[in-house]
Amino acid sequence: MKRLMILNGPNLNLLGVREPHIYGTTTLAQLHESCEKHAKHLGLELSFHQSNHEGELVDWIQSARQTADAIIINPAAYSFTSIAIIDALKTFEGPIVEVHISNIHARDELHRHSRISGAVTAVIAGLGPYGYIAAMSAVAQMKKG
Ligand code: CA2
């Protein structure tokens, strides 16, 4: 397990800027920096992306088949809608961890039922930005496949 791709879905570029009562005060840039530090600590190569566009996320997932051994994805609002992301994730052979900053299970009906969860290896929700760090430690000790 060497190469890790972290993907962030729509509006996560606003982390730390809006709705801090739900998503906290850590910005996406700060999150990226702490993931880079943890990747070094774990000996992982990291690529870290955010997009507001479903097709771009699908393109990165497809490219991960050649460039990554594991994926960590916060699909954000696409968790609840995207068959395209589910189909792309199903083509990836390594471990996939779905991360949510908030505890989606304790939220309103609209934000409660991720359709992505059925296509991933593990799900982390409600740990704040630390969820990404926990997911990285988990994939670092997983075998490929
Ligand atoms: O808790 C999470 O990580 C979510 O994936 C975030 C999504 C939400 O739709 C999911 O239910 C749970 C929303 C991301 C929007 O990000 C924002 C960040 C700051 C301010 C506004 C939106």
Image (cartoon, grey):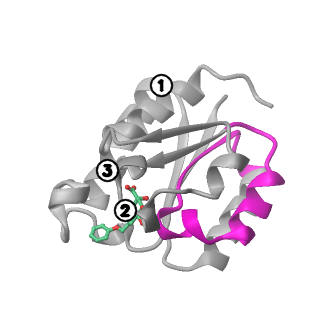
Q: Are marks 2 and 1 in contact (CB under 8 Å)?
A: no
Q: How many marks?
A: 3
When asked about the image quadrant of residue 45, the answer is: top right
Amino acid type at image mark 2: Asp
Residue 109 appears at what percent x and percent y?
44, 63
- Give me the residue at 31% from left, 60% from top: 28
In the rendered structure, the answer to whether residue 12 lies left or right of residue 75 reads: left
Circle 1: residue type? Leu
Q: Secondary structure at mark 1?
A: helix
* Distance Cα–Cα, label 1 vs label 3: 16 Å
Residue located at (20% from left, 62% from top):
16
Relative horizontal placement of residue 65, taking residue 17 as reference (left or right): right
Q: Are marks 2 and 3 in contact (CB under 8 Å)?
A: no
Residue topped by disc 3: 31
Q: Position of residue 68 (x, y in %)?
A: 69, 45
* Picture disc at residue 70: none
Determine which residue is flagged by label 1. 42
Q: Nearer the viewer, residue 139 or 46?
A: 139
Residue 40 is situated, as x and y percent measured from the top left of the image, at 43, 31
Mark closer to the chain start, 1 or 3? 3
Q: Is residue 91 magenta?
A: yes
Residue 108's disc number: 2
Which quadrant of the rendered structure holds the N terminus? top right
- Real-space Cα distance between discs 2 and 1? 36 Å
The residue range painted magenta reads: 66-95
Position of 58 relative to 1 (above/below): below
State the SS at label 2. Answer: loop
Disc nearest the viewer among 2 and 3: 2
Q: Residues within 10 Å of mark 1 (few under 14, many from 20)?
A: some
Q: Earlier in the sequence, mark 2 or mark 3?
A: 3
Indicate the amino acid at tag 3. Answer: Leu
Q: Secondary structure at mark 3?
A: helix
